[in-house]
Image (cartoon, helix red, strand yellow):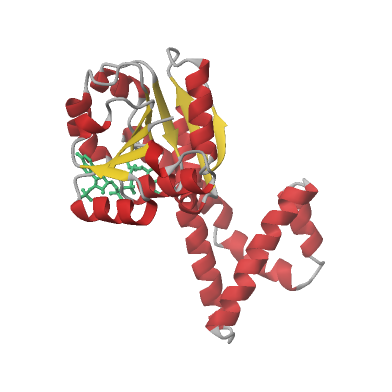
């Protein structure tokens, strides 16, 4: 399988790295086209992939074209490679670029749209993806293998879920990083050394996630197990509820969704 990446930035690099680590592709199977000489130099040095500055050249004689440029650079890229993607499958991770705009911009029908998230950079991502009706089953299987190398993936038949997932799993790592940061700061506020507070918080979050996964119990049931009547946890939960923690999260995700739909 020959893959051409258009855009070798943070996500392009993450994908190259994951495909190599999971042995889905070898360095000689991948070419990265990027306008930045620095990125081209780094990618060929670090991963042994071939790099080039010509998007048109990059997409010839490959099985998969992976679009990983910023949304504002997509129109120019599509203009350049329009009509060159003949038999190839095109997979776009560009936020907000719909299947219909991609098909129209590329004059091509075998198109997959995916929304990975930032932990894909360490192979622990969550990707949601969809495909045009014209995409063949073998092409979907190819996309599933590629996206599976980034972590977990979910295929959906309805494109409407992409904007929703953008608000939840796409932006989600930022919410979680903020939560971690705030919790560590709270630990420091009550007198814990910062490195100790960080270790306590990270293992607590990791342990809580594993507990949800392994027990299969509802998070509310698990929360009740930690909340003794008249104890310390209920004091903290009372403050969180008073501050609107739950509804604030709901409003934050709803605002991100509204924005994702407008992109
Ligand atoms: N980062 C995330 O967590 C994340 C998650 C989900 C989806 N995405 C999507 O993934 C896409 C890439 O994001 P990213 O964070 O990897 O962006 P990035 O780091 O800016 O990478 C994009 C790369 O493409 C290069 N480029 C710009 N115009 C080009 C052109 N015409 N031809 C070839 N290369 C070109 C850029 O060079 P210059 O820097 O010199 O312009 C840069 O090296 C975005 O559309 C984003 O919506 C990102």
Image point (22%, 18%), residue name: 83
Which residue occupies the foreground of this view, 105 or 168? 105
Instruction: Inspect this view and state whether residue 251 appears.
Output: no
From the viewer's perspective, is residue 150 above or below residue 237?
A: above
Q: Position of residue 192 (x, y in %)?
A: 59, 85
**Quick one: quadrant of the C terminus?**
top left
Which image quarter has ligand 1? top left
Tell me which corner region of the image, top left, top right, bottom left or bottom right, holds residue 206: bottom right
Image point (38%, 52%), residue name: 47
Q: Position of residue 202 (x, y in %)?
A: 60, 67
Total label count?
0
**Quick one: quadrant of the N terminus?**
top left
Instruction: Inspect this view and state whether residue 234 appears.
Output: yes
Q: Position of residue 197 (x, y in %)?
A: 59, 78
- Name the side, left or right, on which 69 lies relative to 56: right
Q: Position of residue 220 (x, y in %)?
A: 73, 51
Image point (43%, 39%), residue name: 257
Which residue occupies the foreground of this view, 160 or 104? 104
- Furthest toward the top, the residue is 134
């Amino acid at each position: 399988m020959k893959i051409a990446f258009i855009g070798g930035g943070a996500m392009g690099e993450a994908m190259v790295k994951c495909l190599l680590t999971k042995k889905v592709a070898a360095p000689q199977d991948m070419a990265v086209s990027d306008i930045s000489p620095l990125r081209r130099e780094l990618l060929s040095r670090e991963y042994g992939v071939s790099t080039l500055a010509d998007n048109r050249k990059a997409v010839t004689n490959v099985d998969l074209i992976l679009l990983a440029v910023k949304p504002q650079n997509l129109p120019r890229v599509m203009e350049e490679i329009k009509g060159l993607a003949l038999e190839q499958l095109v997979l776009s991770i560009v936020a907000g670029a719909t299947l219909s705009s991609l098909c129209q911009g590329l004059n091509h029908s075998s198109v997959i749209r995916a929304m990975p998230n930032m932990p894909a950079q360490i192979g622990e991502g969550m990707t949601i993806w969809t495909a045009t009706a014209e995409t063949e089953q073998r092409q979907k299987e190819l996309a599933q293998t590629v996206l599976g190398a980034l972590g977990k993936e979910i295929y959906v038949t309805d494109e409407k879920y992409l904007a929703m997932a953008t608000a939840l799993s796409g932006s989600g790592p930022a919410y979680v990083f903020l939560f971690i940061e705030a919790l560590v700061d709270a630990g420091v506020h009550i007198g814990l050394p910062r490195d100790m507070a960080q270790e306590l918080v990270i293992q607590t979050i990791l342990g809580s996630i594993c507990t949800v996964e392994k027990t299969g119990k509802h998070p509310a049931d698990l929360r009740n197990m930690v909340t003794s009547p008249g104890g310390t946890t209920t004091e903290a939960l009372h403050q969180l509820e008073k501050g609107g923690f739950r509804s604030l999260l709901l409003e934050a995700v709803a605002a991100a969704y509204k924005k994702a739909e407008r992109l």
